[in-house]
Amino acid sequence: MNKPNDREGFVRNAEPLPETPGPIIDIDNEPEQIEQPKEVWPVKVKLLHRGVRSGADTVHELSFREPTGGDINRYGNPCHVNQDGDVIILERKMTTMMSALSGILPPFIEAMDPRDWNSCAYRLRGFFIPDPTAW
């Protein structure tokens, strides 16, 4: 029978466990920087489903110039990251931004096939979200 001071799960007079070392951290070396591929401007996106009017012509590939902070200031940031880390594209702002970066008038961007519009928007979204490596 158990003595009154014995508690289930405890072992009396057990040898202490040997101390295990923690992970070895090299504080002298900085982590390796992964070199990202350089973007080549202008960025071109093929329109696979329907061409877009550009003046009197119809184009089947949109060419986007590099966005600037001034573009965000004028037209708004077309993307944001929600609390779950998902990138949200703001459609109205993205349409305006695509128009500004490509030189195609907004009504013609709005007339794009939705699949082509999404291809352009998803190709451009990476330029409007923060880069965590800068933190």
Image: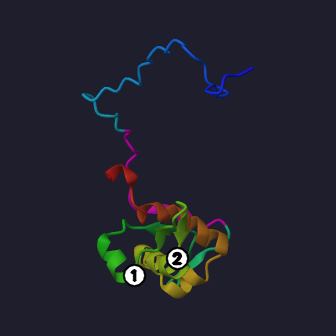
Tag 1 residue: 75
Q: Residue furthest front?
A: 4
Nearer to us in this view, 108 or 91: 91
Nearer to us in this view, 44 or 37: 37
The vertical placement of 106 against 81, above or below, is below
The local crowd at label 2, few if under 14, some if 14 to 19, many if 20 or more residues have their Cα within 10 Å, is: some
Q: Main secondary structure of the magenta part?
A: loop
The local crowd at label 1, few if under 14, some if 14 to 19, many if 20 or more residues have their Cα within 10 Å, is: some
The image shows residue 24 at horizontal and vertical percentages of 37, 23
The image shows residue 70 at horizontal and vertical percentages of 30, 76
The vertical placement of 55 against 8, above or below, is below
The image shows residue 53 at horizontal and vertical percentages of 56, 81
Residue at 31 percent across and 26 percent down: it is: 26
The image shows residue 4 at horizontal and vertical percentages of 65, 27
Tag 2 residue: 90
Residue at 37 percent across and 49 percent down: it is: 38
Q: Amino acid at mark 2?
A: Leu
Nearer to us in this view, 94 or 107: 94
